[in-house]
Amino acid sequence: MTKKDVEKLIEVRKESSFFNHFWNVLIYDFRAKGEIGPNQIKVWRQNMWNMTFYPIFTFEFNANNNLTDIKDEINPIGKTFIGVLLIGFLYLIFPKNLSGFDLLDHLPFVILITIFAFLIVLVARMVYRFEKQNQLEQIFEILDIEVEEKKPEREWTFKKIITRLLIYPFCIGLILFALFYLFPNGKVFMGIASLGFGGMYLYADIKILIEKKTTGNNV
């Protein structure tokens, strides 16, 4: 696999900068974009259901322009989104006057917010991993790269059932929390974040279950 082959993935050439990714999120441009460097190519593409937590794939090449490795990372807007959200949780925990704050008196609330933040990050990670795997399989297909066939994952193992029993109510709670508390109280950004996190995970997981049920194939 050569550098010229990988360049075929790119529809629009763009620099992988914070501004370009921010603009990409705003205008809903679903074309595959990429940055071509001397020894690497970066490729990214958002889609309709996951416009924020899409991956950036970095293809690395040797001196002969042959592909040696493929790496991935979340785009800078996704990183910033999670960072701002976590800072928002810290703002909820700590008051403006820190001198009068007693951690022990507020310990149950602090633990609740910490668990909430952890689950938010967990859901974001699951959404990202699903999107990364989905796009990576599409890239392998386009580039005609043969990979070792994986055994189909069982979706109703004990571990996955327990995970769904914990995450599904949490995601539904996020959606209800956004609709009936955050939006009515003018907290639009937090509302969009809660609605997005809850909705994205439920959509991704249910989509996997439906596709496996109807096709019987590994997604």
Image (spheres, rainbow, N blue to C red):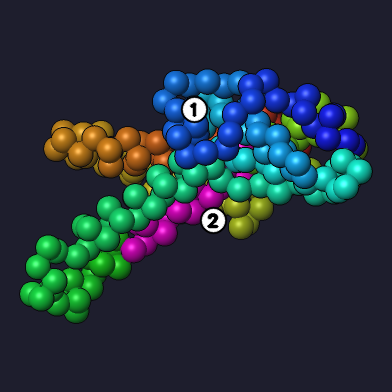
Q: Which one is nearer the viewer's eye here, 72 or 93?
A: 72
Image quadrant where one finds the C terminus: top right
Q: Which one is nearer the viewer's eye here, 37 or 193?
A: 37
Is disc 2 placed on a helix, strand or loop? helix
Q: Is residue 129 magenta?
A: yes
The dot on residue 24 is 1
Residue that appears at 71% across and 49% down: 71
Q: Main secondary structure of the magenta part?
A: helix
The dot on residue 196 is none
Specify the amino acid type for callout 2.
Ile
Magenta part of the protein: which range?
114-131
List x then y, in percent, for residue 114: 34, 63
Q: Which one is nearer the viewer's eye here, 93 or 41?
A: 41
Question: In the image, 99: left or right of 24?
Answer: left
Q: Is residue 53 magenta?
A: no
List x then y, in percent, for residue 135: 68, 34
Q: What residue did someone put label 2 on?
A: 162
Specify the amino acid type for callout 1.
Asn
From the image, state whether disc 1 or disc 2 is nearer to you. 1
Residue that appears at 32% across and 35% down: 192
Task: Give the Cα distance between marks 1 and 2.
Answer: 36 Å
Q: Quadrant of residue 199?
A: top left
Please, is residue 78 above or below residue 3 in the view? below
List x then y, in percent, for residue 159: 61, 57
Question: In the image, 208: left or right of 148?
Answer: left
Question: In the image, 63: left or right of 97?
Answer: right
Image quadrant where one finds the N terminus: top right
Count of numbered labels shown in the rendering: 2
Residue that appears at 88% across and 35% down: 2
Is disc 1 placed on a helix, strand or loop? helix
List x then y, in percent, for residue 212: 70, 33
